Image (cartoon, helix red, strand yellow):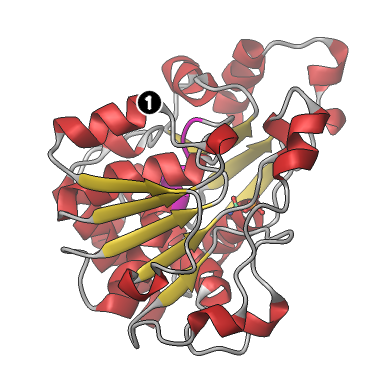
Amino acid sequence: MQNRSLVSISDYTKDEYLDILRIAARCECNPNQNILSGKIVGTLFFEPSTRTRLSFETAVQRLGGRVIGFADAGSSSVTKGETLKDTIKMVSNYVDLIIMRHPLEGSARYASEIASVPVVNAGDGANQHPSQTLLDLYSIQKTQGTLENLNIFMIGDLKYGRTVHSLLMALSYFNPTFWFISSDALQIPVEYKMYLRSRGIQFFEYPEFTDILYEADIVYMTRVQKERFSDPIEYEKNKNAYLLNNAMLENTKPNLRVLHPLPRVNEIDTDVDDSPKAYYFTQALNGMYVRQAIIAKALNLTHELN
Ligand code: CP
């Protein structure tokens, strides 16, 4: 495998998705290894994160590597006016791999063109979140036994939700049927609909989901992305549009699993948490194994994993 960046989910082929899932399964069986001995990974988070940053950092440390970085751009020299270009050039000199989250769409691609080490995109604005997508694929495959021919419900903020954008692109290799449920203001952007049409993928759009939930294999709930709204009144109008509760899961398929990239705000009632169909916390755990696989691949070290 080559030593390379992961900026967009389209940087990987279908075979590479499946390869990552196989490597992640090996990491799940044996998460504590030493392949990163002597390696340092930089985690540059210009936007808040709990899961992505901590699971990447745990992944590095469980593989025997070390981490430097920041969780808040306010503690970096960005506050003094340093450019992203200079920051990336500098950090490239210190580390073997950069993991970066940034609010600007396209910033991860830009960083990967400047950096002398591989860059993994941990989310760039409303654009892409490819490591989340790979852990979503891993979670779907684990719970359904396959990635093929599934009915995937995506509910909530389909406009700004970068995890939705990355995931629909990746799943389009596996002949899904998508059911997009959102308010008019938060519909899936037209370029993603064009992408699906160009690949012959069937999709439906609905304003509500309670009467059609019996069709679902996967329900992918999403948070309304407050930080992406330029108009706070629009956010207030849309913020509580969809709430899944346990009663709604009656008469759904036995294999149905509820996913959410998290954090949740008000999209899934806590009465779902104890349902066997709730999978979002295990999904977040899966992220650690999948990120171990992504790091190993970026550094061309997968052959050293047990
Ligand atoms: N799913 C996700 O990206 O969570 P964080 O924002 O906490 O990293």
Which residue does the image show at 56% across and 50% down from the upper left? 156
Give the magenta-colored segment's residue range: 127-132
> Residue at image x 26%, y 27%?
194
Q: Position of residue 147 (x, y in %)?
A: 22, 65
Of the residues shown, which amino acid type is indicated by label 1?
Val
Horizontal side, residue 113 vs residue 260: left or right = left
Query: Residue 177 is drawn in which quadrant?
Result: bottom left
Kind of element beneath mark 1: helix
Q: Name above or below for residue 131 compared with residue 102.
A: below
Residue at 55 percent across and 58 percent down: it is: 261
Q: Give residue 28's quadrant in the image.
A: bottom left
Instruction: Return the residue nearer the eye: 268 or 64.
Output: 268
Residue 160 belongs to magenta span: no
User: 35 or 218, which lies in front?
Assistant: 218
Q: Between residue 95 and residue 282, name the one nearer to us.
A: 282
Whether 1 is drawn above or below 249: the answer is above
- Percent across and percent down for residue 2 are 23, 38
Q: Residue drawn at (55%, 88%), measured in percent from left and top? A: 275
User: Seen in the image, is 235 located left or right of residue 85?
Assistant: right
Q: Which residue is mark 1?
A: 190
